[in-house]
Image: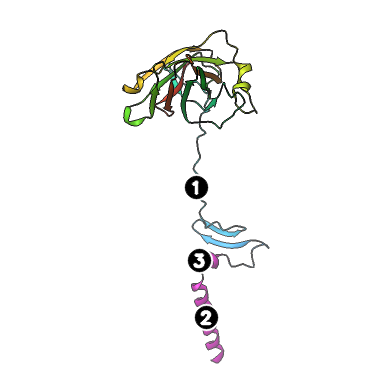
Amino acid sequence: MPLISNIFTSLACLMAVTNAMPASIAARQPSNECATGTYFFHCGEHKGCFSKDPCIEPTPSNPSTPNKPDTECPSGSGQTVLIPSAIYNIFPKNPNVAQAAVSGVRLESYDGASQVEQVVVFSGIPAEAKTCSFGWKQGEKLDRIFIVRGSDGVSDVRQLSGFPEGKDVTYNSVKPFDNAEKNVGGIDFANWDDLDAAGHDAGGVDCAETLYFKVSLRNGDSGTKIYLGQDENNGFEISYSC
């Protein structure tokens, strides 16, 4: 009888240890019937020798639909509006001075000359775009910073033929690309700072996937200063259709 008692005691201990194990560990105990490197598992419809635990549910993946490229032409005949991808200040009287890209419209004339002009870059225009137009807009009064000081806010818009890639953006580095025969048009900021939201068109331009412009006050003697924040509702814009 001592022998039978010892057997029951050993079985009870083995069951206690097995029950105390986590299910995943208990299920992975090697079986003499499994090849080296595999373990016996039994869960749901899985029963047999596996190198990896089939009882662990894989994390479901959420397949993502790739975004349409920015340069794809939208369907329909409507117009799409883009805001600048970059704006740079340039200084005719300090032609080699460069600054980092800025986040708003700034034009100044004083001492009888245009002093602060801007280079405006628009990227992401579809190659299929057929009609492009330069303009500007102002949002609601409470949602904008718009200041005009001076009596003459008329500004010239010129389309540039290129951009000084890899160089500082300065008046001199931009000058070789300012070779258009005529201006895109003129825009007048005067008095609009006192009015409600409105949009303004300067004129049509030649379409390209990236467009570059120079904007400057026309009258250097006006002593005018213009500041307008740039965002979705204010500042420069390009509209295009396909």
Give how far across and how far down residue 175 sits, in percent. Answer: 61, 18
Disc number placed over residue 60 in the picture, else none:
1
For the residue pair 183 and 40, the one nearer the viewer reads as 183
The residue that appears at 63% across and 23% down in the rendered structure is: 164
Q: Is residue 49 left or right of residue 125?
A: right
Badge 2: residue crowd in 10 Å (few <14, some 14–19, many ≥20): few
- Disc 3 on helix, strand or loop? helix
Kind of residue at badge 1? Pro
In the image shown, does 201 or 98 lie closer to the viewer?
Answer: 98
Q: Which residue is mark 3?
A: 23
The stretch drawn in magenta includes residue 15 = yes
Q: Main secondary structure of the magenta part?
A: helix
* Image: magenta residue range: 1-28
Going 35% across and 18% down the picture, which residue do you hit?
191
Q: CA distance from mark 3 to mark 2?
A: 17 Å
What numbered label is drawn on residue 13?
A: 2
| Earlier sequence position, callout 3 versus callout 2 | 2
Q: Residue extending furthest bottom?
A: 2
Type of amino acid at the residue the image marks with label 2: Cys
> Mark 2 or mark 1, which is nearer to you?
1
Question: Regarding mark 2 in the picture, which secondary structure is present there?
Answer: helix
Examine the rendered structure and indicate whether residue 142 appears above or below residue 78: below
State the separation of the CA atoms marked 2 and 1. Answer: 40 Å
Above or below, comparing residue 142 to residue 18 in the picture: above
Q: Magenta span has 33?
A: no
Whole-percent x and y of residue 1?
53, 91
